[in-house]
Image (cartoon, rainbow, N blue to C red):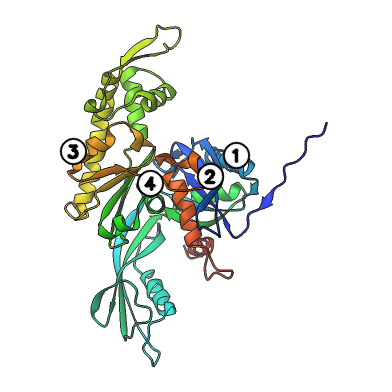
Amino acid sequence: MVKAEPHWREQGADIVVGLDVGTTKVCALVAQRQPETGELHILGIGTAPSEGLNRGVVVNLEKTIASIGQAIEQAEQRSGIRIERVTVGIAGDHVRAQQTHSVITIPNPTREITAADVARLLEDARSVALPPDRFIVHLIPQEYIVDGQDGITDPVGMSGVRVEARVCIITALVTAVHNLQRCIERVGLQVEHIVLQPLASSYAVLEPEEKEVGVALVDIGGGTTDIAIFEEGVVRYTAVFGIAGRQITDDIRRGLGIIAAQAEEIKRTYGHALQESILHDEVFFIPGIGGRKPMEVSKSLLCQIIQPRVEELLEFVLAEIHRAGYLNRLPAGVVLTGGTALLRGIDELAQRIFQMPVKIGFPSARGGLAAEVAHPMYSTAVGLVLFALEHQRPKVPKRSFLQRLRAFFEDF
């Protein structure tokens, strides 16, 4: 009997794919916005172990290509969609944020500021002097100033002669962006958008009210911890550092003398970030290696290994919040997300260290396979599809991400 070939649908304009290429996993998420309700409908998801990245950066092209291909194939099988275009997240301690200032004049006789004027203003911000090894990922306006009047969030329609903008520029290493792009193209996909991972996660786990009053999003992944601080609805500060879930796993591996796979498994099953969160201490056994006897370990002993590393991680986060000048300016506190955010007691420990409200952020999506992604480890993937839906390009875009990147390399 001949096996029937699956019937594939083409990826239409209303279907977006988020590709989260992380240090420990690659996740491809296929989603569609329901026209009747506006809700996000998850059509398919594919995951694969990630073996070609270190702290968010590609270090082995072939392994990364294989991981991406495996995740994409699984997402295609589950969704029935032939994937062609993806929105991909980027992280790593090579990512930098800096402030710049741009200014233009309004030439039209009515002096009315148009959307084209704002686009010209932001394009002027691209002319900032950067090292040759940096590539601009995002231009995020902080505020506009019209004829000396500051605090303006949207100048379109206003009258003025001189328009200024304070802009946050997010840059990444050219080689890191290029290598990630090459891996995706080798799988036969096009990059529609490249998005800073904590910015993507914010679309999935933060409420508009939190962004308005002031909140810090802390996405603790496998290889990096990403921070994004929001106030008045705008990203004000971002930072990335290389202490995250993998370091906790390595501590368990070394502390107990076991292999990495065992360390990761017991971290997820029995791990606590705070001794006081262990209500009933439990003893569990770890199979011995090479015929050795099983090892007997308690939750409290495991916590003695985990807690110091988590405290170090959270102290780094606190230092970044202090460096940004937002230590006492976050009424909504801190939202923890990412796979490591599900360590039991991590929110209590964070609240002690930060001395402000802390909660765990879960991605919000409904319909289809939404229940399968209602987990902090999928926050970036869900955020990427939400970002893609909000920033869908017109039929004739001015300059796509790929065009900008290729133009960069032509000039480089």
Instruction: Say if residue 237 shows up in the picture.
Output: no
Q: Along the polypeptide, which appears first: circle 1 or circle 4?
A: 1
Q: Along the polypeptide, which appears first: circle 1 or circle 2?
A: 2
- Considering every residue shown, the one lying at the far bottom of the view is 109
Residue 345: name its quadrant.
Answer: top left
Q: Along the polypeptide, which appears first: circle 3 or circle 4?
A: 4
What residue would you read off at disc 3? 352
Instruction: Say if residue 155 shows up in the picture.
Output: yes
What residue would you read off at disc 1? 74
Q: Residues within 10 Å of mark 4 (few under 14, many from 20)?
A: many
Q: Residue at x 19, y 39 (%)?
A: 353
Distance between the alpha carbons at the discs numbered 1 and 2:
8 Å
Distance between the alpha carbons at the discs numbered 2 and 3:
35 Å
What residue would you read off at disc 4? 92
* Nearer to the camera, 161 or 362: 362
Q: Residue at x 62, y 50 (%)?
A: 83
What residue would you read off at disc 2? 28
Q: Secondary structure at mark 3?
A: helix
What amino acid is found at the position of numbered circle 1 in the picture? Gln
In the picture shown, does residue 349 fall above or below 134?
A: above
Residue 5 image offset from top left, x and y in percent: 75, 41
Q: Residues within 10 Å of mark 3 (few under 14, many from 20)?
A: few
Is there CB contact under 8 Å for labels 1 and 2?
yes
